Structures are given as structure tokens and as C-alpha cells.
Image: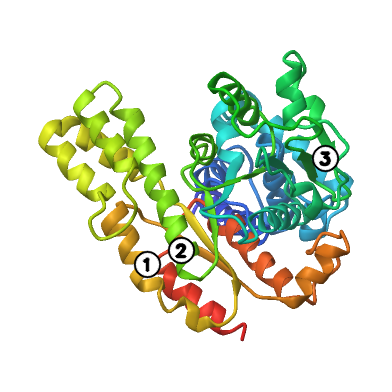
Amino acid sequence: MGDNEKIFEGNRIYNQEMKELVEEFFKNLGLNIDINLIKRVCDLLCFKKVLNDADINKWSAAIVQFVVDLYKLNIPQGAVSDYFVLTGRDVIEITMTLKNLIGSDFNDFKPDYNASNQEAMRIIPVASGKGGVGKSLVAASLAISLASKGFSTIAIDLDLGGSNMHNYLGIPNKNPGIGDYLKAGKSRFEDIIQKTRFKNLDFVAGDGKSPFMANIPFQQKNKLTKDIKKLDYNYIILDIGAGSSFNTLSYFNMSPKGVIVSGTESASIMNFLTFLKNLMFKVIASSAKNNLIITEMIKEAFRQPIERNAIYVSTLLNKIYTIDRNLHDKLINHLGKYRPRIIFNMIDSPEELRLLSELDMTLKKNLSLQCDFIGGIVFDNEVRRIVKSKNPVVMNNSHTKFYNCIDNISDRIIRVWDKPLKDSHKKLYDDVRKLF
């Protein structure tokens, strides 16, 4: 084997080792980084520089830091130097060397701002079919948990008319909120963002000092949703109102993967099924607004409860097929992008979740929806005591069952939010059984 062949073979081996080290680093942080991006950086480095065994660790650190800088990722301070056992100065210097090597090829890696912002940012609306299931507590606790793991997070109280998220974050209700912002008209959304006691976590209050904001006009709702989508955070947690009002459905529709919090009793489950049915009808109505026949069918469907003779989403889609096949096909494609995530709260016994298999079938058959059961929270007597003390439940309460359940759910959000959860109803039942 000639010298050039040896160099090529050596670099090929080092290339693979670096990719594995870099992927492992991001995997340990629960970050889903484009594997093709990592491969391209490694390939370019190996093309431009001859490597040896001593280089692998430091160049791997440089690639990690390059990706972090490129996508403006919010990771714990010192994470790169600690992981690769280097000094902070070493990491800075080797990363600068890598950037110089990449040189004019940098633009090939630089992401489009809007595209990267949408990829890095996850909007997670948290809803419930009825009140009293712990929706706001779960939303606030997830925000705290995600922020504690190094992700820039903002919690926004969109439960206008019933805002109470501040209570679960330990924040007094004395600062301007969304109500004040909408009434002021010319103020900036950034002006109502508050810092919290938690690192990486900001907060926007709901009504603040402006009551009677539950049913804001269409123009204000649109302005609000546009402002939220412009924010630059890893996670945006929206605590939206209970029930199925049009504004609530619109807020939930800001993401195809919103979270629904439900109890395990039949009334709570029926309410969240109604919520999802109305969401699907609203999505279909928006797409079919120019067809008067279909629009009238949807209005009728909205008036029907979920019971034996109700009009289901699947039934409605079959009727649309006979009227406008092209619209039907577009709707099937569009609705297929929706994948709500279900969290069951205040579980007294794993036996309460034996209905999950049947529920999964109901969602698929009647609502034409694939849902993921992303977590269960067992009933914890400690929660009420802590809430009364006006302290956030997940703060310094790692001994509680509630804390551990929230921690598990936030881990799943970080690791698999963008992936379908196969057989999630079976896995959730098995996971909850282990907690009893």
C-alpha cells in the first residue's frame, strides 16, 4: 500500500471514529442533529487535512462546537470541554482552526435562518378537553424541566380568561401580560417577557392586569400567533384554555404535535376526544371553505357529540371523497401530519390504562388520527401540599412521584418529539405499572 493509500485509509477510519464521537455527544444531550451535516463536516475535514490518532478527540470537539455555533444550540456551559477532556481555550482554538479549514465552504453548511429556526424551535401547545385535570401544572412543570436540562424555554399563558400558570412557576401576578400587550396596540411582544428564577426559562403572563380577554378578535389572535412564532427559543410551551372554543383550537393548531392532558375517568376521556374531533373538523373546514356543500356538512358535524350516531371524521372524509376526490386526497395528506401527544394525569392505578388499546383504535378509526401516548403521571398527595406552599412542584422535590413522571416525559420530548412512538399505548401501560 502506497503512502497516499495509507493516508486515505487512515483518514477513512478516523472519519468514522469522529462521526461516532460527535453523534454520541449530541445523543447524550438528547439533541437530534442532522447526521448528514456531521458526515459532511467530517468528510471535508478529512479531505483537507491528514489526521492521526492524537487528532481524533480534539477534532471531534471542534466539530461539535462548530455545529453548536452554526445552529446556535443552547447547551450547558463547559459541556464540550468536559466531554472531550480539553480546556475551554483548547476548544476555542481548534474550532477556529476548523472554521479556517472550511473557509469558503462555510456557506454550504450555513442553514437558512427561517428553516433552521423552525427545526430548532418546538412549539408545544398544552390543552385539555375539560378543566380540573392539571393542565396548567403539567405545562409549567414541563417548561421548568426542559429549561433545567439546558434548553432555552419560554412558558406562555394563553389560557386567557383563566390565566393561572404564574402560580405554578412561583411568580406573582403583578406584571403586564398578553391582555395588556393586545390592548396597548403599539407595544412590543418582547416587552412582556419576564425572567424567572429558573435558568433558561422565561415567562409571558396571560391576562395580567387586563381582564375579559377570553374571546379576543380574529385580528388580535393572528397578531399574537405571529409574534409567538417569531420567538427564538428551543421550546415554547403554550398553556391554552380547556375546552374546544375556536380560539383554543387555533392556538393548539400552531403545532401538529400538541399535548393533551387528560384524566383517566370516562368523562375526561370523552372530552379530549371531542376536542380532537373538533380540531380535525376545524382543519377540514379551513381547507374546504370554498365548497358550500362540504362547509354545510362540517357545520352539521360540529353540532354532533361523540356517540353511536355521531358524524366521525372518517365518515366526513368518505362523504368528501364522493364530492371532491382531489380535496379528499389533499386532506388525507394534510391530516396525516397531525400527531397529538396524550398525557394522562393523576393515575391511581395502572389498571386505569387498560383502555389504551381500545382508545388507540377509536382515535384511528373514528377520528382518522395517529396519536402518541407520551406519558403518565401517577397521583401524588405531595403535589397539593407543595402547590399550596406556592412553590413550583418540580423545584427541589425530586423525591416526589410527580417530579419523576415529569422528568421522564421531558426526556421523551427531547429524545423523540419528532418521531412517531410505535405501540405507545402498550409502552405507557408497562411504564406506569413499574411506578406502582
Residue 105 falls in which quadrant of the image? top right
Q: Are marks 1 and 2 in contact (CB under 8 Å)?
A: yes
Q: Residue at x 22, y 31 (%)?
A: 294
x and y percentages locating residue 310 in the rendered image: 26, 53
Q: Which residue is mark 1?
A: 359
Q: Nearer the viewer, residue 372 or 70?
A: 372
Residue 334 falls in which quadrant of the image? top left
Separation of disc 3 and disc 2 at Cα?
A: 56 Å
Q: Which residue is mark 2?
A: 269
State whether residue 112 appears in this view. Answer: no
Q: Earlier in the sequence, mark 3 or mark 2?
A: 3
Q: Which residue is mark 3?
A: 93
State whether residue 5 appears in this view. Answer: yes
Along the horizontal axis of the image, is 277 left or right of 389? left
Q: Residue at x 74, y 32 (%)?
A: 211
User: Is disc 1 placed on a helix, strand or loop?
Assistant: helix
x and y percentages locating residue 254 in the rendered image: 52, 36
x and y percentages locating residue 25 in the rendered image: 67, 57
